Amino acid sequence: MSQRTAQIVLRDVNKLYPGHPPLHVLKDVNLKIYPGEFVAIVGPSGSGKTTMLSIMGTLDQPTTGEVWIDGVNAAQISEVDRAMLRSDVVGFVFQQFFLLPALTAVDNVAEGMLYQRIRRSERRQRAFEALEMVGLSPRAQHKPGELSGGEQQRVAIARAIAGQPQVLFADEPTGALDQATGHMIVDYLRAIANQGTTVIVITHDQTLANRFDRKISFLDGEIVADKRRRSAGRPGVRKAARPGPARQPRRPDATTIMPPDLVEAL
Ligand code: ADP
Ligand code: MG
């Protein structure tokens, strides 16, 4: 009997922002994401998508409920360990590209690995490989001001994947781009997922969302639909290994024991 283990688990997650009355932004959200999934999150503005993504990526913490990443309860490790988890295990892409204007594309990508204790020469090597993944090798020595919006977003994606995260989060990565460019970005995200990285993307665009293997719909702080495409294949089964040097991800010592429902018999 084979088993699959969820990579990210949200259990009864609630998020309230203080106020009179408090703003209840996430309401008992339960969710499991499996390794290598290619997931879109859709929903109207203000429905809690960014809040949920931030909590999944440990940038933010729930008011109540649990977040498990790779078998580690994010609430039960120190802030230092959470920062380590973020730099080693997850990558982020945002609607604004947040590139440094004075640096070339390759230096922007290499910069993203500064906190990963990777030698400078290897940072550059990985930066070039990541740019190649998004078809930007020929533009590696250009600065952001010399690149189109779509190219700048591809640099931002390269920066997020260069550290070889297990999970890539993207919050409206195509929001500032025209639709054709948005489709191209989704093509690259799909290629990244095909190499085994879990990819979770917030988008407003239903046409784009329909290209993902799984679509989670949000409304007013709740998941109202969660659909997998039939052709999507079995989640939790890693596809081809990522090329490049093998890397053993460091992670905090799991002093917590994974609850049995994170592991499911198939
Ligand atoms: P979405 O990404 O779906 O547009 P968000 O998660 O950004 O939604 O926001 C959900 C709700 O929470 C919104 O009403 C927003 O104004 C509110 N909100 C987000 N961040 C904060 C915060 N730091 N303090 C107070 N309210 C917030
Ligand atoms: Mg948002």
Image (spheres, grey):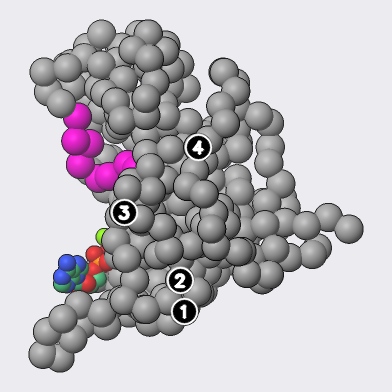
Instruction: Give me the C-alpha separation between circle 4 and circle 3.
Output: 16 Å
Camera-side mark, 1 or 3: 3
Task: Check if mark 1's residue and mark 3's residue have beta carbons within 8 Å.
Answer: no
**Dot placed on the residue nearer the N-terminal end, 2 or 4:** 2
Q: Which residue is mark 2?
A: 66
Mark 2 is on which residue type? Glu
Residue at numbered disc 4: 250
SS of the residue under disc 4: loop
Q: In the rendered view, would you say 237 is above or below 204?
A: above
Q: Whereabouts is ligand 1, in terms of quadrant? A: bottom left
Tell me residue 57's x, y (percent): 38, 54
Q: Earlier in the sequence, mark 3 or mark 2?
A: 2
Residue at 38% from the left image edge and 14% from the top image edge: 119
Where residue 160 sits in the image (x, y, percent)?
Answer: 37, 34
Q: Write the residue at 31% across / 54% down.
A: 79
- Density class for disc 2 (Cα within 10 Å; few <14, some 14-19, many ≥20) is many
Confirm or deny contact between disc 3 and disc 2 (CB under 8 A): no
User: Amino acid type of disc 4?
Assistant: Arg
For marks 4 and 3, the one nearer the N-term is 3
**Highlighted magenta segment, given as a residue range:** 91-99
Disc ID at residue 79: 3
Q: CA distance from mark 1 to mark 3?
A: 22 Å
Closer-to-camera residue (237/120): 120
Amino acid tagged 3: Glu
Q: Farthest residue to the right: give it.
A: 1
Disc 1: CA contacts within 10 A as few (<14), some (14-19) or many (>=20): some
Q: Label 1 belongs to which residue?
A: 12
Q: Residues within 10 Å of mark 3 (few under 14, many from 20)?
A: few
**SS for dot 3:** helix
Distance CA(mark 2)–CA(mark 4): 22 Å
Res 250 seen here: yes
